[in-house]
Image (cartoon, rainbow, N blue to C red):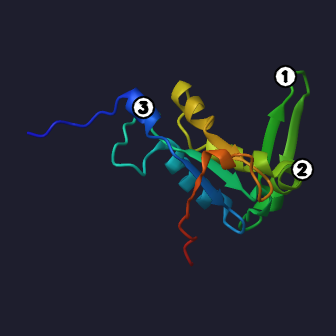
Amino acid sequence: MQKTFVLKTAAAESDRKWQVVDIAGMTLGRAATQVAHVLRGKNKPTYTAHVDCGDFVIVVNADKIHLTGKKMDGKLYYDHTLFPGGLKTRTAGQLLKHNAKALVERAVWGMLPKGPLGRRIYKKLKVYAGATHPHAAQTPAELKLAPARKS
């Protein structure tokens, strides 16, 4: 009988790599699911659900992301100032124009587990609106995401 493999936390931290992904022209949801998959470590054979075993992911060109259908005008994002009447509502188009980085971060955050493990995983996501990033010293490898399916 073969035993189930369980990754130790120290081994997971030593095996982390840096990946850079260019999401220019990609669909937001499809890119976010694949980025969350790598952040979580599900692409590795040593994946363990209760351990943070994923890689660091650098996302560039967040301002060139694509949304399908009428989501630019119809999808709403809500923030609250915690004061009475402090509900702030923005469309995806407004958020993309004002802060494209936040649009990608919110999409990926929604696909990660909630709680202490999810917050630790989320800290490994680095998103930049332009094509440059300050993480050249980590020598990130290029990550190719699967293209969108043709309908």
The amino acid pointed to by label 3 is: Val
Lower position in the chain sequence, tag 2 or tag 1: 1
Q: Is residue 71 above or below residue 115?
A: below
Please tell me whether mark 3 sits on a helix, a strand or a loop: loop
Question: Dot 3, crowdedness within 10 Å: few (<14), some or many (≥20)?
Answer: some
Q: Which residue is mark 3?
A: 51
The amino acid pointed to by label 2 is: His
Query: At 50% from the left edge and 49% from the top edge, which residue is drawn?
Result: 37
On the image, the x and y values in percent for residue 87 come to: 87, 33
Mark number, residue 98: 2
Task: Indicate the quadrant where residue 27 lies.
Answer: bottom right
Question: Dot 2, crowdedness within 10 Å: few (<14), some or many (≥20)?
Answer: few
Please tell me whether mark 1 sits on a helix, a strand or a loop: loop
Query: At 89% from the left edge and 21% from the top edge, which residue is drawn?
Result: 83
Question: Dot 1, crowdedness within 10 Å: few (<14), some or many (≥20)?
Answer: few
Please give the count of numbered marks on the rendered protein.
Answer: 3
Q: Which residue is mark 1?
A: 82
Mark number, residue 126: none
Question: In the image, is 106 to the left or to the right of 56?
Answer: right
Query: At 73% from the left edge and 68% from the top edge, which residue is drawn?
Result: 69
Question: In the image, is 101 to the left or to the right of 47?
Answer: right
Question: In the image, is 90 to the left or to the right of 43?
Answer: right
On the image, the x and y values in percent for residue 100 come to: 80, 52
Q: Is residue 61 above or below residue 83?
A: below
Nearest to the eye among marks 2 and 1: give it.
2
The amino acid pointed to by label 1 is: Leu
